[in-house]
């Protein structure tokens, strides 16, 4: 510990007698005055100074500012061992264990170090450490601390607690420290979708709550002090993550999952930067990818909308629709949805497979799927619904299998999920395999039903996804065929096994000549291409006979069976 000041004749400043360090001032006639001046200067500095023997970790010296900054009591300051001092200091910090671990790491090297320390009470200290070789051939470590709380506050966004645009703009200047190593940086840009509508419909207080929630969500990706989250614009955020390897894919997946879990609808873009000088360029690329994703999401959303359910795309929503979206979020989170099962029959009247249908009953009222499914797609809840439906379906197959009722189930797959695969590379095939292994069910017991809009997002990516699914034994079926813009020739290039002719074309067959011509032509071309055909919304035995005579393989509709609860479906099979 630092002793009381020596008399004018004393040529050195010493620590306690157990310490080895001596600060010698090699001048001929003014050693003592220079020593006194130096000590006075050290005590007047705005920085807190601590010097520790790097070998035996004894405290050699600290100035008055160090004691003041760290609020060191007399009982601690009289101890020459740095252990008691560090333990006391650590109790004031947000991450005491990390602080102590880093102290030991720094002492184990000869490198200089520079970072920041966050206190529980909101204070922020800049910390710098230098290893110095003494004249007696041992090393000491000099620690320098400065309170930068007021300086940091001008770089903090008052609403979200994230770093602000001013902090982002300082990247690359002398005032910005990214870290102590030459690292790569992953830059992720996040921009809220339809944020203006939130402010217009609910007011700015609601918009502020969304921004706060997004800030909290993005901070979950932070792993260390070098990682940063910025609010770079009104509803735009940027994440800067330090990494020695390319983590763009994993960060993109995790970011998307975090946003979905938080119920936040946003577009994202991710890019890696190898050098500090390239971060701004990486930001531009990530921003461009985010804008492309936002454009694709809007295009996809528009393509999904049927004139009868404008709820998902209207610029303004009614209070009833807003409440429905909030209630849906709760229902999905608490797994309050239900499943119904509708069989598909072959030409001999036997059940070929069973379609799984998602149902939602809220306050005793059945909410039609053509209302809540578009809502789930526009809000991102569709991913959670898929996870639940998939697992429940596999569990159902497992239960039926135990009762010697082996039959396959078909699950509906959204075009939004194809877009999600395109943007993140999420492996649906691995997800399906994992759940099937858990319940000892073969993936061959599952079929995936996709709408034609699934093919409109990116044909090559769709083909890649579909091939991954068929590789594990999952058959693919195009649902509501004829209502989209795809063609049989396009699907010939894809690993599709079945098509289901939309019920609007089956309606009135064979009396409706127009629908009859379309249906006959579709069945004929599908058979030529080796595709198996299922007719939806079959209403009579006459329709079945007519469709069968033209080569239709399967039939589905209320005439044969309405959607049933699992218990009743088990009896039927």
Image (cartoon, grey):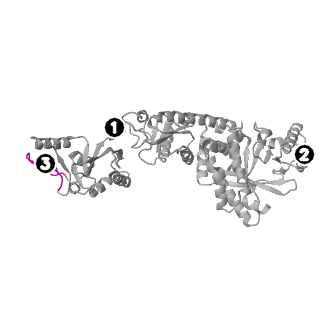
**Residue 346 in the image, given as x and y percentages of width and height:** 84, 54
The C terminus: image quadrant = bottom right
Q: Which residue is mark 3?
A: 5
Element assignment for label 2: loop
List the single residue furthest toward the front.
137
- Tell me the CA gap for discs 2 and 1: 79 Å
Category of crowding for the residue at label 2, using alpha-carbon neighbours closer than 10 angstroms: few (below 14), some (14–19), many (at least 20)? some
Mark 1 and mark 3 residues within 8 Å of each other at the beta carbon:
no
Q: Earlier in the sequence, mark 1 or mark 3?
A: 3
**Residue 340 in the image, given as x and y percentages of width and height:** 72, 54
- Res 151 label: 1
Element assignment for label 1: helix
Mark 2 and mark 1 residues within 8 Å of each other at the beta carbon:
no
Q: Is residue 36 left or right of residue 348?
A: left
Residue 11 is covered by the magenta coloring: yes
Pick the front one: 246 or 155: 246
Pick the front one: 80 or 85: 80
Report the mark closest to the observer, 2 or 3.
3
Residue lying at 69% horizontally and 42% vertically, measured from the top left: 462
Q: Earlier in the sequence, mark 2 or mark 1?
A: 1
- Res 550 label: 2
Q: Which residues are magenta?
A: 2-16
Q: Earlier in the sequence, mark 2 or mark 3?
A: 3
Task: Kindly indicate the quadrant of the structure image that contains residue 435.
Answer: bottom right
């Amino acid at each position: 510990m630092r002793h009381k000041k020596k008399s004018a004749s004393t040529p050195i400043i010493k620590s306690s007698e157990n310490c080895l360090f001596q600060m010698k001032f090699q001048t001929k006639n003014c050693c003592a005055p220079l020593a006194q001046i130096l000590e006075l200067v050290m005590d007047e500095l705005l920085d807190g100074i601590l010097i520790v023997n790097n070998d035996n970790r004894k405290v050699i010296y600290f100035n008055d500012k160090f004691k003041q900054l760290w609020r060191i009591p007399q009982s601690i300051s009289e101890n020459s061992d740095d252990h008691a001092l560090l333990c006391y200091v650590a109790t004031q910090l947000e991450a005491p264990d990390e602080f102590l671990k880093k102290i030991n790491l720094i002492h184990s090297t000869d490198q200089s170090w520079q970072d920041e320390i966050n206190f529980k009470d909101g204070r922020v200290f800049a910390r710098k450490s230098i290893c110095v070789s003494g004249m007696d051939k041992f090393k000491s470590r000099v620690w320098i601390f400065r309170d930068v709380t007021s300086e940091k506050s001008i770089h903090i966004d008052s609403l979200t607690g994230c770093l602000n645009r001013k902090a982002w703009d300082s990247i690359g200047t002398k005032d910005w420290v990214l870290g102590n190593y030459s690292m790569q940086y992953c830059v992720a840009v996040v921009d809220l979708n339809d944020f203006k509508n939130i402010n217009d419909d609910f007011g700015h207080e609601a918009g502020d709550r969304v921004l706060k929630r997004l800030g909290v969500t993005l901070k979950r990706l932070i792993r260390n002090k070098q990682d940063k989250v910025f609010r770079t614009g009104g509803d735009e955020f940027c994440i800067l993550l330090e990494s020695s390897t390319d983590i763009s894919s994993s960060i993109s997946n995790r970011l998307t999952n975090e946003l979905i879990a938080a119920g936040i609808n946003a577009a994202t873009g991710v890019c890696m930067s190898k050098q500090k000088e390239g971060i701004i360029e990486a930001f531009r690329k990530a921003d461009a990818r985010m804008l492309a994703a936002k454009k694709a999401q809007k295009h996809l959303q528009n393509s999904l909308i049927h004139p009868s359910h404008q709820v998902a795309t209207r610029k303004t929503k009614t209070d009833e629709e807003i409440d429905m979206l909030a209630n849906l979020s709760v229902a999905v989170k608490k797994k309050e949805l239900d499943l119904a099962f509708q069989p598909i029959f072959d030409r001999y009247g036997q059940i070929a497979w069973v379609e799984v249908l998602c149902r939602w009953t809220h306050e005793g009222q059945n909410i039609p799927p053509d209302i809540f499914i578009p809502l789930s797609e526009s809000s991102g809840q569709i991913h959670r619904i898929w996870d639940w439906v998939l697992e429940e379906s596999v569990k159902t197959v497992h239960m039926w299998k135990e009762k010697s009722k082996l039959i396959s189930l078909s699950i509906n797959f959204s075009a939004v999920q194809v877009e999600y695969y395109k943007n993140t590379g999420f492996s649906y095939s691995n997800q399906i395999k994992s759940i099937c292994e858990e319940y000892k069910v073969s993936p061959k017991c599952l079929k995936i039903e996709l709408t034609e809009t699934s093919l409109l997002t990116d044909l090559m990516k769709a083909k890649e996804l579909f091939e991954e699914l068929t590789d594990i034994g999952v058959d693919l079926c195009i649902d509501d065929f004829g209502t989209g813009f795809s063609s049989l020739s396009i699907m010939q290039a894809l690993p599709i096994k079945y098509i289901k002719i939309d019920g609007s074309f089956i309606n009135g067959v064979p009396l409706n000549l127009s629908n009859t011509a379309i249906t006959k032509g579709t069945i004929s071309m599908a058979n030529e291409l080796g595709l198996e055909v299922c007719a939806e919304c079959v209403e009579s035995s006459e329709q079945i006979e007519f469709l069968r005579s033209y080569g239709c393989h399967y039939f589905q509709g209320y005439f044969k069976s309405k959607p049933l609860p699992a218990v009743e479906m088990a009896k039927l099979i």
